[in-house]
Amino acid sequence: NAGVTQTPKFRVLKTGQSMTLLCAQDMNHEYMYWYRQDPGMGLRLIHYSVGEGTTAKGEVPDGYNVSRLKKQNFLLGLESAAPSQTSVYFCASSWDLGANTGELFFGEGSRLTVL
Amino acid sequence: GENVEQHPSTLSVQEGDSAVIKCTYSDSASNYFPWYKQELGKGPQLIIDIRSNVGEKKDQRIAVTLNKTAKHFSLHITETQPEDSAVYFCAASISGGYQKVTFGTGTKLQVIP
């Protein structure tokens, strides 16, 4: 049972380049999330999804797009990377419909540097 | 929206001593308060949580207390061990389904052997 898997783990981009981060979960969770983590700012929600084919904006959505074409996958895209998007990105999932828990399950993170 | 403040930002304790991390929240509708531990190079992992109908919860060496009136909650770690060294995040949310979770800014705990 792999849980939540993120790829790639590390990436360096030049300003203006595009890239996609992939998140996959094998727990049949309904909800998936993308967070960014910056020093002194905790975890901030970028976008989230409450089910296959749905997405919604979080706290800091500008400059990012997401898609959830399959229940187990949640993609985060940067169309034109900026240095301000240098961060560690975490994917999370939650809500097994058979469980009464609010626990978020996180991946191990993807460190992105934009030069 | 919800605002969660967490203190201190860093905490150093001697092995065997206790550690306390405090958080306050602003939205009285929040009713679920998880604590996550993040080890170096890893994603956060839930260590304990508490719901608003409970004042205290314990799990071995860790405990969480909640004061709904004052809108604050705390994490207590007793008999600290070097493996407790990590970053701890408190959070507040409204439970059920989609987790609209607001995180605190984190506390880096160092346990000195």
Image (spheres, coloured by chain):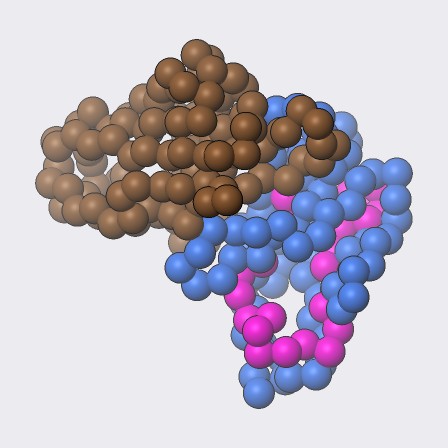
**Magenta residue span:** B66-91
Chain letter corresponding to the colour brown: A
Chain letter corresponding to the colour blue: B
Name the residue: 20% across, 32% down: A19
Residue A114 shows up from this direction: yes
- Residue A75 lies in what quarter of the image? top left
Name the side, left or right, on which A22 lies relative to A4. Answer: left
In the picture shown, does residue B27 fall above or below A109?
Answer: above
Q: Is residue B68 magenta?
A: yes
Q: Is residue A115 magenta?
A: no
Expressed as whole percent of the image width and height from the top left, the position of residue B38 reads 52, 57
Expressed as whole percent of the image width and height from the top left, the position of residue A77 reads 27, 27
Towards the viewer: B83 or B15: B83
Find the residue positioned furthest to the front.
A1
Find the residue positioned furthest to the top.
A53
Name the residue: 86% across, 53% down: B56
Towards the viewer: A30 or B109: A30
Expressed as whole percent of the image width and height from the top left, the position of residue B106 reads 54, 55
